[in-house]
Image (tube, grey):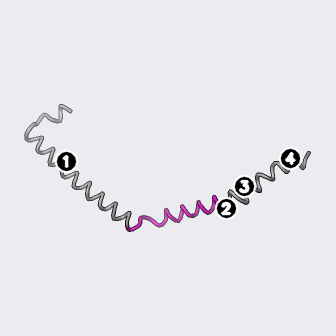
């Protein structure tokens, strides 16, 4: 009876240690390495492009708001 209980506990533990734990550790440290590398050159260029587009959009919105303020001063109250 005691050998059966030990086998029931030991078998899944061995399977975990042989198969699951090494894969888990490899994937964990691979993801840590990718996080520590930071942005790639392509990602940085894309981020910079998006920031420039956001700046242009901000300028356009300010221009549109100033036009609306001069033509229809009550436009903000309607929204």
| Residue that numbered label 4 is attached to | 5
Whether residue 52 sits left or right of residue 13 in the image: it is: left
Give the distance between the C-alpha atoms of the residues marked 2 and 1, in whole angstroms.
Answer: 54 Å
Residue 22 - label: 2
Give the distance between the C-alpha atoms of the residues marked 2 and 3, in whole angstroms.
Answer: 9 Å
| Up-down relation of residue 15 to residue 68 (above or below) | below
Residue 37 - label: none
Q: Earlier in the sequence, mark 2 or mark 3?
A: 3
Give the distance between the C-alpha atoms of the residues marked 4 and 2, in whole angstroms.
Answer: 26 Å
Q: Which residues are the magenta region? A: 23-41
Rendering coords of residue 10 (x, y %):
81, 53
Q: Are marks 4 and 2 in contact (CB under 8 Å)?
A: no
Q: Are marks 2 and 3 in contact (CB under 8 Å)?
A: no
Give the distance between the C-alpha atoms of the residues marked 1 and 3, in whole angstroms.
Answer: 58 Å
Residue 23: image quadrant is bottom right
Q: Is residue 55 magenta?
A: no
Rendering coords of residue 73 (x, y %):
10, 36
Q: Earlier in the sequence, mark 4 or mark 3?
A: 4
Q: Residue at x 76, y 51 (%)?
A: 12
State the quadrant of the C terminus: top left
Q: Earlier in the sequence, mark 4 or mark 2?
A: 4
Disc 1: CA contacts within 10 A as few (<14), some (14-19) or many (>=20): few
| Residue that numbered label 3 is attached to | 16
Disc 3: CA contacts within 10 A as few (<14), some (14-19) or many (>=20): few
Q: Residue at x 53, y 65 (%)?
A: 33
| Up-down relation of residue 76 to residue 32 (above or below) | above
| Residue that numbered label 1 is attached to | 61
Disc 2: CA contacts within 10 A as few (<14), some (14-19) or many (>=20): few
Front residue of 39 and 69: 39
Viewer-nearest of labels 2 and 1? 2
Q: How many marks?
A: 4
Rendering coords of residue 70 (x, y %):
8, 41
């Amino acid at each position: 009876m005691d050998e059966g209980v030990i086998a029931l506990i030991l078998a899944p533990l061995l399977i975990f240690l042989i198969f699951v734990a090494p894969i888990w550790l490899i994937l964990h440290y691979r993801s840590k390495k990718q996080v520590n590398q930071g942005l790639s050159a392509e990602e940085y260029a894309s981020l910079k492009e998006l920031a420039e587009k956001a700046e242009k959009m901000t300028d356009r919105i300010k221009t549109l708001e100033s036009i609306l303020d001069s033509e229809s001063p009550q436009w903000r109250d309607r929204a």
